[in-house]
Image: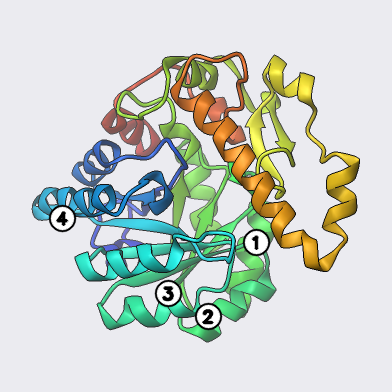
C-alpha cells in the first residue's frame, strides 16, 4: 500500500486510524494496532478519573517504543465538563495526536500545538471543514453518512470530494470502510486515509461484552438504525428488539424543550447523560436493555478476531 500524507504525519505503515469508540476502545486495542502498522485512538471520556487517563497515556508511551502512533479523542463542546482538564493532562503527558468532536477546536489546537501534538477535527460538511482549517487544524476527519455512532449526512464520495477540492489540509475519511475495496475507494476519492471503528468492536481485545461483539457478527448493514435516544444527536445503533421497543425518535416533550434556546443545552446534557448510562450498561453488563452503537461496516464482521487479524484482513 502506497504511503500517503497520513502515513507521513503519524509515521505509520498503513493509512488507517483505529477510530475512538466510547466504552469500546482501550489501551490493549491501540497497542495491537500500533504493532500492526496503524494508529490507534481512545476517547478521553473512557476514563473516569485523572489517574486512569494518566496511566493509559503512560502505558501507550511505553508501548510506542517499537513504533506506531496513538491519540485521544476529545468532545470539545460545553456539555463535556471534563474537556479542558483532560486536554491539559494529554498535553502534559504527551500524545501523537488529538481528534476533536462536537464543538469548537480552537483551544485544543492552540494548546496541543505548543506541545507538538497534531490535531485532527471531525466535521460533517464543507463549512466546518473550512472553519477548522482556518483555525490551524493539521487534518480534517470527514464524518460521512456511513459512520458508526454520531454520523454525518453526506455520502463518502461527495463529502471527501467537496472538502479535498476546497481545503488544502489532508482529509481523513470516517465511515463505511470495512474491507480493502472500501479503503481503496476513499483513497481514490482523495482522502489520505481512513478512520475505522466498527470493525474493531468484535475484537478479542475490546472491553465490551461477548453479546455486543456477537451482535456485530450476527447483524449486518441492514440491521443498523439511526436513533435520537442516546445523546439527542442522531447516532447509529444495532436494531435490537429493545431498540425497536423504545423507538428511535425524541419524545414530544424533548422536541418542545429543544426549541427553547435557554433550555436546549440542559435538555441535551440530560439526554446525553441518560443515553450514555444506558449504552455503558449494555456494553459492559448482561442486560435486556441492549443499546449497542455500531455502523453499517459490521457487514464485513464475520467472527470475533484479534485486532491484528482484523487489520490483516482489512489491508489484504
* Precedes in sequence: disc 2 or disc 3: 3
Q: Is residue 21 left or right of residue 224?
A: left
Q: Secondary structure at mark 2?
A: helix
- Callout 1: SS: loop
Reading the image, the residue beneath label 4 is 61
Q: Which residue is mark 1?
A: 124
Vertical relation: 56 (above or below) 129: above
- Is the C terminus in the top left, top right, bottom left or bottom right quadrant? top left
Q: Vertical placement of 92 versus 309: above or below? A: below
Assess disc 3: are there few (<14), some (14-19) or many (≥20) residues with their C-alpha within 10 Å of its C-alpha: many
Mark 2 → mark 3, Cα distance in angstroms: 13 Å
Label 1 or label 3, whichever comes before in sequence order: 3
Vertical arrangement, residue 263 with respect to residue 32, above or below: below
| Relative depth, front residue between 121 and 248 | 248
Q: Are marks 3 and 4 in contact (CB under 8 Å)?
A: no
x and y, in percent, of residue 261 in the image = 82, 67
Residue depicted at x 30% and y 32%: 307
- Residue 313 or residue 278, whichever sits in front: 278
Q: CA distance from mark 3 to mark 4?
A: 20 Å
Q: Position of residue 205 (x, y in %)?
A: 30, 28
Helix, strand or loop for disc 3: helix
Which residue in the structure is indicated by mark 2? 133
Q: Are marks 1 and 3 in contact (CB under 8 Å)?
A: no
**Which sits earlier in the primary sequence, circle 2 or circle 4?**
4
Determine which of the numbered discs, if any, sits on residue 108 in the image.
3
With respect to residue 207, does 249 lie above or below? below
Quarter of the image where one finds residue 229: top right
Q: Distance between the Cα atoms at labels 1 and 2?
A: 14 Å
Relative to residue 80, is residue 274 drawn left or right?
right
Mark 1–mark 3 distance (CA, rounded to whole Å): 19 Å
Amino acid at each position: 500500500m502506497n504511503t500517503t500524507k497520513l502515513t507521513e504525519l503519524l509515521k505509520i505503515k498503513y493509512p488507517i486510524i483505529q477510530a475512538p469508540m466510547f466504552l469500546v476502545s482501550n489501551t490493549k486495542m491501540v497497542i495491537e494496532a500500533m504493532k500492526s502498522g496503524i494508529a490507534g485512538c481512545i476517547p478521553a471520556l473512557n476514563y473516569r478519573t485523572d489517574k486512569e487517563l494518566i496511566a493509559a497515556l503512560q502505558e501507550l508511551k511505553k508501548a510506542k517504543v517499537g513504533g506506531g502512533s496513538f491519540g485521544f479523542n476529545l468532545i470539545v463542546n460545553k456539555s463535556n465538563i471534563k474537556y479542558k482538564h483532560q486536554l491539559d493532562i494529554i498535553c502534559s503527558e504527551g500524545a501523537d495526536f488529538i481528534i476533536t468532536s462536537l464543538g469548537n477546536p480552537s483551544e485544543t489546537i492552540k494548546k496541543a500545538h505548543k506541545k507538538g501534538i497534531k490535531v485532527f477535527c471531525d466535521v460533517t460538511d464543507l463549512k466546518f471543514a473550512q472553519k477548522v482549517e482556518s483555525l490551524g487544524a493539521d487534518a480534517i476527519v470527514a464524518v460521512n453518512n456511513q459512520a458508526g455512532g454520531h454520523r454525518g449526512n453526506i455520502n463518502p464520495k461527495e463529502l471527501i470530494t467537496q472538502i479535498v477540492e476546497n481545503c488544502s489540509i489532508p482529509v481523513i475519511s470516517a465511515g463505511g470502510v470495512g474491507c480493502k475495496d472500501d479503503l481503496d475507494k476513499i483513497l481514490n476519492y482523495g482522502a489520505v486515509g481512513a478512520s475505522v471503528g466498527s470493525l474493531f468492536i468484535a475484537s478479542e481485545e475490546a472491553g465490551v461484552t461477548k453479546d455486543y461483539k456477537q451482535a456485530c457478527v450476527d447483524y449486518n448493514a441492514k440491521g443498523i438504525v439511526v436513533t435520537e435516544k442516546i445523546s439527542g444527536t442522531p447516532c447509529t445503533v444495532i436494531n435490537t428488539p429493545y431498540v425497536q421497543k423504545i423507538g428511535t425518535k425524541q419524545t414530544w416533550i424533548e422536541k418542545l424543550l429543544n426549541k427553547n434556546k435557554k433550555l436546549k443545552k440542559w435538555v441535551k446534557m440530560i439526554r446525553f447523560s441518560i443515553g450514555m448510562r444506558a449504552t455503558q450498561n449494555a456494553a459492559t453488563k448482561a442486560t435486556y436493555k441492549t443499546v449497542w452503537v455500531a455502523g453499517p461496516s459490521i457487514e464485513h464482521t464475520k467472527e470475533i478476531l484479534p485486532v491484528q487479524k482484523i487489520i490483516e484482513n482489512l489491508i489484504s
